[in-house]
Image (spheres, grey):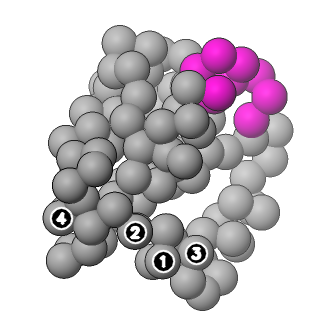
Amino acid sequence: GGTGTWMLAMACPEKFAALAPVCGSGIYWYGEAVKDIPIMMYHGDCDDVVPLAESINMLNAVNKRGGNAKLNICYGVGHDAWEYAYRGDELLNWLLAQKK
């Protein structure tokens, strides 16, 4: 899931043109590792599995280092924000627009 997305990207950032973690947590102090990758996050504000604060912390960690991370908060949503992230073409079109 979202946490795996962060871990894999932090381990080998050179392999990714973009990231789209959903309901994930990362290692904040490694925000530098992914600062050059465009990132679009989704997280439910009612998530009781991975708190929204985890995505907010990653957003701040990446952007504080000059990165380009965005967070879409899904209000009234729990740990199923993927239902919103993958609905429609917005995320897919954003991912396809990113180039390495």
Q: Which residue in the structure is indicated by mark 4?
A: 46
Label 3 and label 2: CA atoms lie apart by 11 Å
Q: Residue at x 48, y 37 (%)?
A: 3
Question: Image check: 27 left or right of 44?
Answer: right
Q: Residue at x 45, y 77 (%)?
A: 84
Sequence order check: which comes first, mark 4 or mark 2?
Answer: 4
* Residue 7 visible: yes
* Circle 3 or circle 2, nearest the eye: 2
- On screen, residue 27 above or below 93: above
* Circle 4 or circle 3, nearest the eye: 4
The quadrant in which residue 17 appears is top right
Determine the secondary structure under disc 1: helix
- On screen, residue 11 above or below 36: above
Taking the magenta stretch, the answer to whether it contains residue 91 is no
> Where residue 55 appears, x then y in whole percent?
32, 43
Question: Image check: 33 left or right of 52?
Answer: right
Label 4 and label 2: CA atoms lie apart by 10 Å
Residue 80: which numbered mark, if any?
A: 2
- Front in this rendered view, residue 62 or 8: 8
Q: Residue at x 27, y 67 (%)?
A: 78
> Magenta residues, as a range?
8-16
